[in-house]
Amino acid sequence: MTPHNHAKPGDYAEAVLLPGDPLRAKWVAETFLKDAKLVNSVRNCLGYTGTWNGKRVSVQATGMGQPSLSIYVHELINVYGLKTLIRIGTCGGLNARVKVRDLIIAQAATTDSTIVKDGFGAFNFAPIADYGLLRSAADKAEEKGMRYHVGNMLSSDIFYHVEPGMAGYGRLPGHGVIGVEMESAALYTLAARFDVKALTVCTMTDCLVTHQEISAEERQTSLKDMVSLCLDVATA
């Protein structure tokens, strides 16, 4: 047990999906998992374990942002022994070729946060996904006929920039950064530090280039396809 998690040893499977929103964790557990059991509710950051196609898997909310995710991921790895961590969420689009409802599979994660820089002194560490998970996700998306893009994601500590729209992202879109969210760089850094596997898959819900966006109802429908894909990858 930890200050943030009252699960007992063995309550989690070795593979976990990581949504930010606790209610999304609850929705994933109730919608997709068989025999789902609540294993953590400290601070209402809900965690569940059940089965998907007969294989044990967990889902744990992390809250928003890299500091919050880092607490949960550190504890899941070092206290509970998790080996495969897949972030599931939504993101903004920074490239017009990425359409709303498309998946972004984050090959790497750029960040404006010092949370990655802090551990490396003069070096600029490049946080990247586990290749096996990334390849599996891309292959399964291809098989299912899903629209997806593999590329560089921005994990930003800032949601409301002083400069609105694309101006707040500087030269990043011109260097292949195609989406923006708030967690993946920390996830990938911790996975590298503790020698476990990690991946982020997000549904693009609003494009900062074209200003297209989808409704809350449409988001839920799109997320169903993404979650089932990630469950397949996590339990492969």
Image: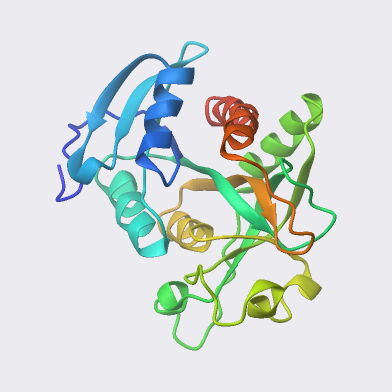
If the image is split into quadrants, where does the N terminus sit?
A: top left
Position of 109 relative to 37 (above/below): below
**Does residue 164 show up?**
yes
In the displayed structure, does residue 31 sit left or right of residue 152? left
**Does residue 10 show up?**
no
Q: How is the image coloured?
A: rainbow
Q: Nearer the viewer, residue 18 or 8?
A: 18
In the displayed structure, does residue 11 sit left or right of residue 121? left
Q: Residue 217 sits in which quadrant?
A: top right
Q: Residue at x 74, y 42 (%)?
A: 102
In the displayed structure, does residue 178 sit left or right of residue 188? right
Position of 212 relative to 160 (above/below): above
Position of 92 relative to 56 (above/below): below
Q: Where residue 23 appears, x then y in whole percent? A: 37, 35
Q: Residue at x 36, y 48 (%)?
A: 62
If the image is split into quadrants, where does the C terminus sit?
A: top right
Q: Where residue 46 appears, x then y in whole percent? A: 29, 36
In the displayed structure, does residue 11 sit left or right of residue 56? left
Residue at the right extreme of this rendering:
97
Q: Where residue 216 appears, x then y in whole percent? A: 57, 38
Q: Where residue 120 appears, x then y in whole percent? A: 45, 79
Residue at the bottom extreme of this rendering:
122
